Image: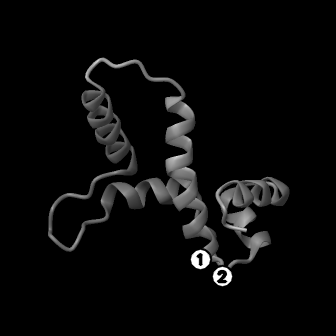
Amino acid sequence: MSTVDSKDLEQYAHTTQPQSGMPAQTLRDTVHQSLTSYFKQLDGQPVTDVYQMVLSEIEAPLFESVMAYTKDNQTRASEVLGLNRGTLRKKLKQYGLL
Protein backbone atom coordinates (compact mmCIF):
# COMPACT_ATOMS: atom_id res chain seq x y z
CA MET A 1 0.00 0.00 0.00
CA SER A 2 1.46 3.36 -0.98
CA THR A 3 1.11 6.40 1.21
CA VAL A 4 -0.11 9.85 0.26
CA ASP A 5 1.63 12.80 1.86
CA SER A 6 0.84 16.51 2.06
CA LYS A 7 2.66 17.21 -1.22
CA ASP A 8 0.37 14.74 -3.00
CA LEU A 9 -2.66 16.41 -1.44
CA GLU A 10 -1.42 19.85 -2.49
CA GLN A 11 -0.90 18.66 -6.06
CA TYR A 12 -4.38 17.12 -6.06
CA ALA A 13 -5.87 20.39 -4.80
CA HIS A 14 -4.21 22.31 -7.63
CA THR A 15 -5.05 19.96 -10.50
CA THR A 16 -8.49 18.46 -9.85
CA GLN A 17 -11.18 19.75 -12.15
CA PRO A 18 -14.81 19.85 -11.00
CA GLN A 19 -17.50 18.26 -13.21
CA SER A 20 -18.35 21.71 -14.63
CA GLY A 21 -15.04 21.97 -16.45
CA MET A 22 -14.16 25.11 -14.49
CA PRO A 23 -10.63 25.38 -13.07
CA ALA A 24 -10.30 23.78 -9.66
CA GLN A 25 -10.15 26.12 -6.68
CA THR A 26 -7.61 25.25 -4.02
CA LEU A 27 -8.48 25.03 -0.35
CA ARG A 28 -6.21 28.03 0.18
CA ASP A 29 -8.16 30.05 -2.40
CA THR A 30 -11.45 29.05 -0.82
CA VAL A 31 -10.30 30.08 2.66
CA HIS A 32 -8.98 33.37 1.30
CA GLN A 33 -12.25 34.17 -0.47
CA SER A 34 -14.31 33.20 2.58
CA LEU A 35 -12.26 35.39 4.90
CA THR A 36 -12.35 38.32 2.47
CA SER A 37 -16.13 38.02 2.33
CA TYR A 38 -16.34 37.67 6.13
CA PHE A 39 -14.33 40.85 6.71
CA LYS A 40 -16.40 42.75 4.12
CA GLN A 41 -19.59 41.72 5.91
CA LEU A 42 -18.18 43.00 9.19
CA ASP A 43 -18.01 46.45 7.60
CA GLY A 44 -15.40 47.69 10.08
CA GLN A 45 -17.01 46.19 13.19
CA PRO A 46 -14.51 44.90 15.76
CA VAL A 47 -13.81 41.19 15.73
CA THR A 48 -11.69 38.85 17.87
CA ASP A 49 -10.65 35.20 17.88
CA VAL A 50 -10.65 34.86 14.08
CA TYR A 51 -7.84 32.31 14.26
CA GLN A 52 -9.85 30.00 16.54
CA MET A 53 -12.97 30.48 14.41
CA VAL A 54 -11.12 29.48 11.24
CA LEU A 55 -9.50 26.47 12.93
CA SER A 56 -12.83 25.17 14.18
CA GLU A 57 -14.46 25.67 10.78
CA ILE A 58 -11.69 23.69 9.08
CA GLU A 59 -10.90 21.07 11.72
CA ALA A 60 -14.42 19.72 12.20
CA PRO A 61 -14.98 18.70 8.56
CA LEU A 62 -11.35 17.54 8.32
CA PHE A 63 -11.85 15.12 11.20
CA GLU A 64 -15.26 14.03 9.89
CA SER A 65 -13.80 13.26 6.47
CA VAL A 66 -10.74 11.44 7.78
CA MET A 67 -12.82 9.36 10.20
CA ALA A 68 -15.14 8.37 7.35
CA TYR A 69 -12.13 7.56 5.15
CA THR A 70 -10.63 5.34 7.84
CA LYS A 71 -14.01 3.82 8.76
CA ASP A 72 -13.72 5.30 12.27
CA ASN A 73 -10.38 3.64 12.93
CA GLN A 74 -8.74 6.14 15.27
CA THR A 75 -5.28 4.63 15.01
CA ARG A 76 -5.36 4.85 11.22
CA ALA A 77 -6.92 8.34 11.34
CA SER A 78 -4.14 9.57 13.63
CA GLU A 79 -1.59 8.21 11.15
CA VAL A 80 -3.37 9.86 8.20
CA LEU A 81 -3.50 13.18 10.04
CA GLY A 82 -0.01 12.92 11.51
CA LEU A 83 -1.39 13.40 15.02
CA ASN A 84 -0.88 11.56 18.25
CA ARG A 85 -3.91 9.32 18.90
CA GLY A 86 -4.57 11.10 22.20
CA THR A 87 -4.64 14.46 20.42
CA LEU A 88 -7.03 13.05 17.84
CA ARG A 89 -9.38 11.77 20.58
CA LYS A 90 -9.29 15.17 22.29
CA LYS A 91 -10.19 16.92 19.03
CA LEU A 92 -12.93 14.41 18.22
CA LYS A 93 -14.48 15.06 21.64
CA GLN A 94 -14.11 18.82 21.15
CA TYR A 95 -16.19 18.68 17.97
CA GLY A 96 -18.71 16.16 19.27
CA LEU A 97 -17.44 13.41 16.98
CA LEU A 98 -16.70 10.88 19.72
Location of residue 95 (image quadrant): bottom right
Residue on which disc 1 sits: 68
For this orientation, the residue located farthest to the right is 86
- Residue 67 is situated, as x and y percent measured from the top left of the image, at 64, 72
Location of residue 23 (image quadrant): bottom left
Q: Nearer the viewer, residue 25 or 60?
A: 60
- How many numbered callouts? 2
- Image: 68 above or below 24: below
- Where, quadrant-wise, is the C terminus in this rendering? bottom right
- Residue at 32% over, 43% down: 29
Q: Nearer the viewer, residue 79 or 87?
A: 87
- Residue 43 is situated, as x and y percent measured from the top left of the image, at 25, 22
Secondary structure of the residue carrying numbered label 1: helix
Location of residue 70 (image quadrant): bottom right
The amino acid beneath tag 2 is Lys
| Disc ID at residue 3 | none
- Residue 65 is situated, as x and y percent measured from the top left of the image, at 54, 69
Question: Horizontal placement of 64 versus 87: left or right?
Answer: left
- Residue 24 is situated, as x and y percent measured from the top left of the image, at 26, 58
Dot 1 alpha-carbon crowd within 10 angstroms: few under 14, some 14 to 19, many 20 or more: few
| Disc ID at residue 71 | 2
Question: Horizontal placement of 85 versus 5: left or right?
Answer: right
- Residue at 49% over, 30% down: 50
The amino acid beneath tag 1 is Ala
For this orientation, the residue located farthest to the front is 45
Question: Horizontal placement of 39 versus 55: left or right?
Answer: left
- Residue at 51% over, 50% down: 58
Q: Are circles 2 and 1 on residues that touch, CB within 8 Å? A: yes
